Amino acid sequence: MVALVQSMAGDHPARPVLVLSNDPAAGGLVRARALGIATAAVDHKPFGKDRAAFEAALQAELDKAAPDILCLAGFMRVLTPGFVTAWAGRMLNIHPSLLPKYKGLNTHARAIEAGDAEAGCSVHEVTAELDGGPILGQARVPILPGDTADTLAARVLPLEHRLYPAVLRRYAAGDRTPIMLSGANS
């Protein structure tokens, strides 16, 4: 989130209008306020299994800020098809794998266990299919002998911070051409 917010300066075609979290204690909210960005939190816990009510509360906060594009980053809640459809073509997510491989959780461990030669991250448009929307960018790193999920994640993270802002800039300008980065020396 910080990398995205900091990238939206100068001639960037987008500006941050809100950082919204489902965790009122999220550190990103503090960082966003320090950067002068409006913040809001909608705690998902009081809603229990009522995802529609939770998403209505999210939408109410979004309506106040009126963003053109939603950028998910660390938002670990599955959104319903109804919510996703309302934001179709205007919602991005970053995922820590080379999609379409390893949708969901524990992606780095799964890549290592599968014996993959490389891993990375993907930025994609959000659709109703979990981690299944069109890929707008990927960054790759080799999986090194002795890598653990933590060491691999640490090498992928700097590429996430480069890739997501680059994709957002292009996407906000109306260009859906995928961006491919390599971190061979990472």
Image (cartoon, rainbow, N blue to C red):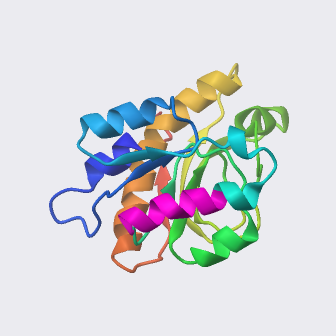
**Predominant SS of the magenta segment:** helix
Identify the residue at image location x=20%, y=56%: 9
In this picture, residue 120 sits left or right of residue 19: right
Residue 84, placed above or below residue 157: below
Tell me if 115 is positioned left or right of 125 in this view.
Answer: right
Q: Which residue lies furthest to the top in this view?
A: 146
Q: Estimate the x, y position of residue 136 in percent, counting from the top left.
A: 53, 67
Residue 131 visible here: no
15 sits to left or right of 47: left
Q: Position of residue 175 (x, y in %)?
A: 41, 78
At x 78%, y 54%, the residue is: 50
Q: Is 143 above or below relative to 84?
A: above
Above or below, comparing residue 3 to residue 27 in the picture: below
Residue 180 in the image: x percent, y percent?
49, 60
Question: On the image, which quarter does residue 173 sit in?
Answer: bottom left
Q: Is residue 61 magenta?
A: yes
Q: Residue at x 70, y 19 (%)?
A: 146
Give the camera-side residue of 112 and 132.
132
Q: Can residue 170 be seen in this view?
A: yes
Q: What stretch is highlighted in magenta?
A: 55-66
Residue 178 position (above or below residue 22): below
